[in-house]
């Protein structure tokens, strides 16, 4: 199977407000996809549609090749999902939840789960409600990892985790990715996490996917160029793919999204200014694209 | 899988605070009634128990599908992500909630039995026949045509009292039942019956609206209007239902007949309620399953 999931031309509105508009996204097997967007951009809704938890107005969804509403039990067992506000049965203990999960998932990895519980210092005999919010989130992720998923879907997985737990979780997700068949689709606001894990990213803006590309390609295509003018600064800049203009004294910083490798040369020839190419990290790129 | 889910759900109920708070509340009401308010037999509490049961039952069943609304975080999301079908989820929920309701009602009845004033309750469970009383009441009924309403009521009133003192509760009920057929027409019980029927219809409408529009695909005013309100109606109906049954002993001011009134409610109202609620539940089940499980819009 080439695509582990497909969301094609999805339209979703809620209480008269459009949440997703002609939204399409496909994930290839073995890929780790970082899903970005501002608060309320529709990331969680898109994930819920993918999981068959909420309906949509138009479009088509395929999860492991099937309609998520009608998906076979055996295929659903290959999908691990942890939502943003994951709620586990509050009165169950971790040990009871493990037994419950064991019965549902044929590929359940008991030793691996035990190892993770020990590593994250989660007491198996404690009730869920007695665990802290971060611990509950970790437990939910551990349970999802324990099922040895072909596709792991995580909605804001690192929110509420301490730095050490976050680091260890990332290591385990990387470990999962070493299995060539596994794919991870996760949304996050913590761009450092996405930079660490994702090989492809998507940015959702106004219900539409404005970016859907390899992380490395994105980093190359979005550039910041500083132009230091000694003479008059031109009133406008006519550059293809121009995202923003910032003026600092006699300097202008242009943010451009362009696949043209000669864009710097083009600008140099067009304007009589000293030109400097500035480094951009993912956070800066995200802010430019999502604002 | 249904069995696993059932166990999981049941555990969460039994361990949760909800059931215990309900039980404590009921025990508290029983205690207050018997010690302070001169309302006999703890019947009031049994009725209250029924109201709570209905509330818990419908509230829980229809909240099963909350997770389908955007922005709603629910334990159902956890289950929906698992290789469990919605139909299994629905049955597990139905069974576990039914079990809890059964536990609730049995606990209330056992508590009533324990608190001595038990004859009425005993009757509802182990009613018995008394040939002598039956022939007696038959002759009373024959006399009915020749008496004024007032005289007849007084007559039956005394008879019910006598039958109760003799421990013949089944016959007391039969007598009371014929009495209340008249009584309903010009007294508060009619109001109670009306209120209950109204609430039942109201709840049915609310449930159907919720099932049909709870996750409406259509946009615009209809959707906004119907998305949230039905469940609120349902909850609100539950509260009014509780309130209405609390009023019964007040509305029926004749304290010596209170037992009969309560029993009548069992016979006249409760049976109909059970039938109506079962029908409602069945309709709800079919519609919900069609909509949620089979993903067919109605």
Image (cartoon, grey):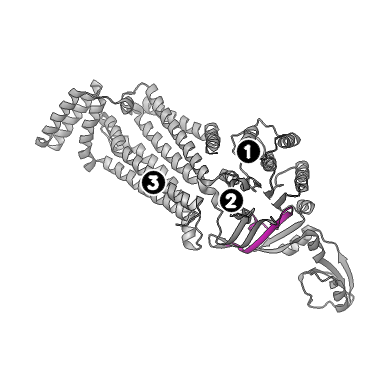
Q: Chain of mark 2?
A: A
Marks 1 and 2 sit apart, C-alpha to C-alpha, by 19 Å
Of marks 3 and 2, the one in the foreground:
2
- Image coordinates of residue B145 in percent, x first then y, are 11, 37
Residue displayed at 39% across by 51% down: B205
Judged left or right of residue A249, residue A89 is left
Image quadrant assignment for residue B267: top left
Residue A32 placement, left or right of B13 = right
Q: For the magenta stretch, what is the residue range?
A: A18-43
As drawn, the label of residue B280 is 3
Q: Would you place residue A247 above or below residue B184 in this image?
A: below
Looking at the image, is mark 1 or mark 2 nearer the viewer? 2
Dividing the picture into quadrants, the one containing residue B117 is top left
Q: For residue A101, which numbered disc appears in the image? A: 1
Between discs 1 and 2, the one toward the N terminus: 2
Quadrant position of residue A11: bottom right
Q: Quadrant of the N terminus of chain B?
A: top right
Q: Is residue A37 shown in magenta?
A: yes
Q: Is residue B225 magenta?
A: no
**Residue A49 rendering spot, x and y as whole percentages:** 60, 55
**Residue A250 seen in render:** no
């Amino acid at each position: 199977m080439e695509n582990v999931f497909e969301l094609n031309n999805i339209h979703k509105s809620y209480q008269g407000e459009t949440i997703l508009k002609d939204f399409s996204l496909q994930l290839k097997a073995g890929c780790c996809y970082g899903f970005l967007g501002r608060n309320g951009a529709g990331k969680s809704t898109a994930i819920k549609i993918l999981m068959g938890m909420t309906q949509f107005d138009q479009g088509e969804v395929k999860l492991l090749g099937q309609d998520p509403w009608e998906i076979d039990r055996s295929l659903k067992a290959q999908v691990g999902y942890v939502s943003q506000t994951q709620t586990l049965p509050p009165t169950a203990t971790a040990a009871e939840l493990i037994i419950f999960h064991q019965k549902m998932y044929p590929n359940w990895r008991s030793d691996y789960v035990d190892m993770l519980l020990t590593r994250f210092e989660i007491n198996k005999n404690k009730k869920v409600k007695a665990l802290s919010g971060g611990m509950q989130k970790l437990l939910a992720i551990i349970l999802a990892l324990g099922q040895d998923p072909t596709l792991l879907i995580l909605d804001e997985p690192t929110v509420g985790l301490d730095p050490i737990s976050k680091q260890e979780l990332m290591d385990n997700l990387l470990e999962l990715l070493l299995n060539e068949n596994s794919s991870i689709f996760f949304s996050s606001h913590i761009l450092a996490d996405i930079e660490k894990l994702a090989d492809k990213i998507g940015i959702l803006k106004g219900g539409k996917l404005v970016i859907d590309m390899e992380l490395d390609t994105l980093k190359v295509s979005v550039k910041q160029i500083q132009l230091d003018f000694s003479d008059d600064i031109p009133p406008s800049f006519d550059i293809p793919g121009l995202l923003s203009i910032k003026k600092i004294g006699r300097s202008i910083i242009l943010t451009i999204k362009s696949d043209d490798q000669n864009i710097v040369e083009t600008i140099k020839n067009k304007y009589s200014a000293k030109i400097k190419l500035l480094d951009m990290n993912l956070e800066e790129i995200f802010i430019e694209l999502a604002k | 899988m249904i069995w696993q889910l059932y166990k999981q759900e049941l555990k969460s109920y039994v361990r949760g605070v909800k059931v215990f708070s309900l039980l404590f509340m009921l025990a508290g009401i029983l205690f207050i009634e018997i010690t302070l308010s001169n309302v006999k037999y703890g019947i009031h509490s049994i009725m209250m128990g029924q109201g709570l049961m209905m509330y818990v039952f419908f509230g829980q069943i229809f909240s099963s599908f909350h997770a389908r609304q955007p922005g709603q975080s629910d334990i159902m999301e956890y289950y929906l992500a698992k290789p469990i079908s919605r139909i299994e989820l629905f049955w597990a929920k139905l069974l576990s909630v039914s079990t809890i309701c059964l536990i609730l009602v049995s606990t209330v009845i056992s508590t009533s039995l324990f608190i001595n004033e038990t004859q009425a309750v005993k009757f509802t469970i182990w009613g018995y026949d008394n040939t002598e009383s039956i022939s007696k009441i038959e002759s009373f009924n024959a006399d009915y045509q020749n008496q004024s309403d007032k005289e007849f009521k007084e007559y039956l009133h005394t008879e019910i009292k006598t039958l109760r003192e003799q421990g013949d509760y089944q016959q007391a009920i039969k007598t009371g039942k014929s009495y209340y057929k008249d009584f309903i027409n010009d007294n508060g019980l009619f109001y109670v019956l009306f209120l209950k029927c109204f609430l039942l219809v109201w709840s049915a409408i609310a449930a159907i609206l919720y099932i049909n529009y709870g996750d409406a695909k259509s946009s615009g005013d209809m959707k906004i209007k119907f998305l949230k309100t039905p469940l609120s109606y349902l909850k609100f109906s539950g509260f009014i239902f509780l309130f209405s049954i609390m009023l019964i002993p007040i509305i029926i001011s004749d304290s010596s007949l209170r037992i009969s009134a309560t029993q009548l409610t069992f016979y006249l109202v409760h049976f109909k309620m059970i039938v109506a609620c079962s029908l409602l539940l069945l309709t709800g089940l079919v519609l919900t399953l069609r909509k949620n499980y089979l993903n067919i819009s109605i």
